[in-house]
Amino acid sequence: MKYGVNDLGYYGDFGGAYIPEMLYPNVEELRQQYLTIIEDPAFKAEFDDLMKNYVGRPSPLYHAKRYSEKYGANIFFKREDLNHTGSHKINNAIGQILLAKRLGKHRIIAETGAGQHGVATATVCALMGIECIIYMGEIDMQRQAPNVSRMKMLGAKVIPATSGSKTLKDATNEALRDWIANPVDTHYIIGSVVGPYPYPDMVARFQSIISSETKKQLLEKTGNELPQYVMACVGGGSNAMGMFYHFLDDEDVKLVAVEAAGKGVDSGHSAATTFLGREGVLHGSRTILMQTDDGQVIEPYSISAGLDYPGIGPQHAYLYKINRAKYVSITDDEALQAGLLCSQLEGIIPAIETAHALAYLEKMQFKKDDNVVICISGRGDKDLDTYIKYFGF
Amino acid sequence: MNRLQNLFKNKTNSLLSIYFTAGYPELDSTVAIAEALEKSGADFLEIGFPYSDPVADGPTIQHSSEIALENGMTLHVLFEQLKDLRKTVSIPILLMGYVNPIVQYGVENFCKKAAEVGVDGVIVPDLPMYEYEALYSKYFIDNDLSNIFLVTPQTTEDRIRKIDELSNSFIYLLSSSSITGGSLDVSSGIEDYYKRIKAMQLKNPMIIGFGISNKTNFDKACEYANGAIVGSAFVKLLKDEDYLNKIPAFIKSIKS
Ligand SMILES: Cc1ncc(COP(=O)(O)O)c(C=O)c1O
């Protein structure tokens, strides 16, 4: 695969495994085993079975007619919001819990921002009867309260991250610290295509089911498995990488990744990583991150907890640098308006994360026959409070 | 030969190293603390430069790092503070911190500047062995800086041997896989770990760190290794307003 990871864990200059020695044995064990495990036919069979019968895949590729009319192209929604637990995060959680079982781990930790990855992880842990500990920023616990309750109901222990900005990056720090202290029995289910190698590649592979299904569905619906555009929102970048994955080598397919501009890229309250960031090291990989001249990580801001992260996965950093994908950003206001529009034009209340991708349709110039696939990464139930406050319903 | 290598040539047991964060509690307390530690009998020092996301650190050093950053500590400021260090401090000095600030400063520049102000070695917990060896070791070697690697009970023998090969002053041994500020593991299995390492007959001396907080566990650590490092317990002392005057008694309480 032209844009895939090399033997050393790098995508061009990005990636690697910048981790303290305490994490080395765990990460090395994963590196040595992940491909063997996930390519094993028995693993594949179990994964496929759960995807079909538990998650409810394949997720529909819905031809959004009123959107198509409005934007003057054929707009397709890849409905990850219809998955069990309400987002794409379950694809990765299922993959990693099956992997953790084969590695003989009996304790699972995870970080979560919007709570979707926490809920997905708590769900698969319940399914497998494995202990589950979720780290979540204190601020995120407030703004995504329904998901905190869901995780508890599923039997997970939710531990607030109280350091730094008290959001996703700090939850990730706490999860890494937990993993350092529990080097033998614990698997860390990272929720996006971030972290030390092999995580970015492993998570991308589990999420790639999004684009493999999309290709088949497009062929059925349009007679061509390739669209002109593929779009997705980017926090760490897992739904986008899953949506891009099987289109990466099809150079004619234009890839659009939408970051969160927060209150505006120049406002000082933003999470538009490629616009504001520089190359550096964050959470175990060399990537692009928002940082001061001195290399301190800048606390990001977005109304969307799932996009409120100062970095992006290393493969995204690479696709950005070599211009294989276009990285753009959308403000809080634009996203919330797009969330309302999608609700009222298509009867789908999207997650605020997803609404960022939808909002960028306003800025695209399509030709009438263009086929456009947009990843509806999650549903908006968790965000109702935020929508209600904003629109004053 | 740098000061660190010289020290290990002349003294092989009960070496005491102290860690503290540059710029904490005050921006310009760095050099005064180093001077007080040398006078009080510390054998060598680790000066931490702060990072916003110190994943290998517990609450105490997270806090000192946060305050140091608020105080305005950066690598530029630190090197400026250390400009005349060698006029008043002669014991070996290591810098300890995370890789991103070094990458932003420029690894080559960082090594040059560290050597220029009289630093003898560097500890970067999240700098991988491969990247060190392939990309950066030349700058360390050119500037006579020792790079210090960590070893935990889970580190395999092959890897320890490789670390021994790449090291030229000492190996930093953790009693357990933990973040800073925990407690020394004195469980029964731990003796086997130290014995296993001793039996490997490595060329480098061994210093134990993470979780050393008092004389009891300092002495325990010195039974197995050439010395030990006290970090969080010392950083806690710096909360005291009169911290400079408390340093001699603190060192004495561990080393007497
Ligand atoms: C619905 C939804 N979309 C997108 C994201 C962003 O994550 P990623 O960029 O890894 O897809 C999240 C994260 O919580 C999410 O819940």
Image: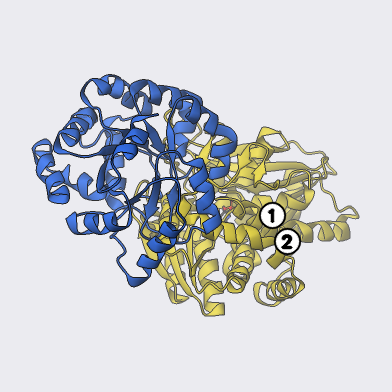
Q: From the viewer's side, name the closer residue of B234 and B160.
A: B160
> Residue at 36% across / 24% down in the picture?
B76
* Quarter that holds the N terminus of chain B: top left
Q: Is residue B86 positioned above or below A21 on the image?
A: above
Q: Which residue is mark 1?
A: A242
Q: Is residue A190 visible?
A: no
- Hey, which quadrant is residue A95 in on the image? bottom right
Q: How many neighbours does mark 1 have within 10 angstroms: few (below 14), some (14-19), or many (20 or more)?
A: many
- Mark earlier in primary sequence (2, 1): 2
Query: Helix or strand or loop: what does disc 1 sit on?
Result: helix
Q: Which residue is mark 2?
A: A209
Q: How many neighbours does mark 2 have within 10 angstroms: few (below 14), some (14-19), or many (20 or more)?
A: many
Asked if badge 2 and badge 1 are on a common chain, one would say yes
Q: Is residue B45 visible?
A: yes
What kind of residue is marked 2? Ile
What kind of residue is marked 1? Gly
Q: CA distance from mark 2 to mark 1?
A: 7 Å
Colour option used: by chain
Query: Helix or strand or loop: what does disc 2 sit on?
Result: helix
Q: Chain of mark 1?
A: A
Q: Tell me: B195 left or right of A368.
A: left
The colour one sees for chain A in the rendered image is yellow
Q: Chain of mark 2?
A: A
The colour one sees for chain B in the rendered image is blue
> Residue at 37% across / 35% down in the picture?
B5
